[in-house]
Image (spheres, grey):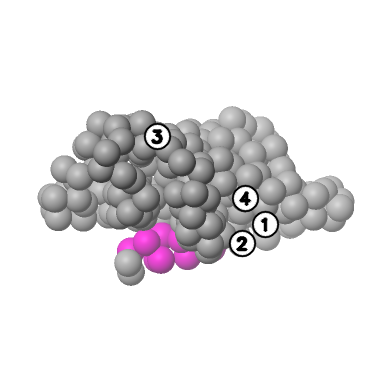
Amino acid sequence: MEPTPLLLFAVTVLPLICTPGPDMLFIASQAINGGAAAGLRATAGVCTGYAVHSLLVALGLAAIIAASPWLFEALRWIGVAYLAYLAVRLIRSAMRAGSLGLQAAVRGGQFRRGLLTAVLNPKGMMIYFAILPQFMRADEPAAAQAMALSAIFIALCALVYAGLSVLLGLRRGRSGGFSDRRRRWVEGVSGGMVAIAALVLARD
C-alpha cells in the first residue's frame, strides 16, 4: 500500500483509541491495581485480541458476523457479561479484609483477561469492518491491505495503552506500600471502572 492511506488511517483511528472505552478502562484498572507490569500484560492481551480481529477481517469472517444481527448482539452481551463478572470479582475482593496474597495468586491472568476483553468487545471489531474498507483500494489484494491497516491499529493501541500503564504504574509506585485498607480501596475503584466499561458497552 502507498503511505498516504496508511497515514490517513492512523490519523483517523488515533482519536478513537485515545477515547476511553472498555479496553482502556480495563487496562487502567489493572495498572492501578497491579502496577505498570500488570497494565502491560493486559495491554499485550488486548493487542493480541485485536490481532484475532485482524485475522477475521483478512479471512472475511467479520462481514459474516456483521450480516447476522443476532450473532452480533450475542457477542455484545457476552462481552458485557464478562466485564460485569470482572467488576463483581474486584468489588467482592474489596469488601473482604485480608492480605495481598490473592493478587500474587492471579499473577499473569491480566494477559488472558485482556485478550478476552478485546475479543469479546464488538466495538473493536466494528473499527475493522466499518473503517478499514474506507482506506482499501479495489485494485490491490484485500487481505494484504487489511493486515497492513490492522498492524497500524494494533501498534497505535500498544503505544497508547503501554504509555497509560507506565504512567499509572509510576503514580501508584510513588504512593508507597499497600496496606489492606488501601488495597481494598484500590480494588473497589478498579471494580467501579470495569463496571462503567460494562455499562458503556451495554448502552451502545
Residue 172 lies left or right of residue 98; in this view the side is right
Of labels 2 and 3, the one closer to you: 3
First along the sequence among labels 4 and 3: 3
The mark found on residue 2 in the picture is none
Neighbour tally class for label 4: few under 14, some 14-19, many 20 plus, Cα within 10 Å: some
Check if residue 86 falls in the magenta segment. Answer: no
Residue 177 placement (x, y as % from top left): 84, 48
First along the sequence among labels 2 and 4: 4
Residue linked to disc 4: 160
Contact? badges 1 and 2 (CB < 8 Å): yes
Q: In this orientation, does residue 155 appear? A: yes
Total labels: the figure holds: 4
Where does the C terminus fall, quadrant-wise?
bottom left
Residue 91 placement (x, y as % from top left): 53, 56
Looking at the image, which residue is at 16% across and 43% down? 64
Q: Gap in Å between the C-alphas at discs 1 and 2?
A: 5 Å
Contact? badges 1 and 3 (CB < 8 Å): no
Looking at the image, which residue is at 33% across and 46% down? 136
Neighbour tally class for label 1: few under 14, some 14-19, many 20 plus, Cα within 10 Å: many
Looking at the image, which residue is at 46% across and 41% down? 2
**SS under mark 4:** helix
The mark found on residue 147 in the picture is 3
Residue linked to disc 1: 186
Which amino acid type is marked by label 3? Answer: Met
Image: magenta residue range = 192-202
Residue 195 placement (x, y as % from top left): 47, 61
Front-most of 148 and 97?
148
Neighbour tally class for label 2: few under 14, some 14-19, many 20 plus, Cα within 10 Å: some
Residue linked to disc 2: 189
Q: In this orientation, does residue 125 appear? A: no
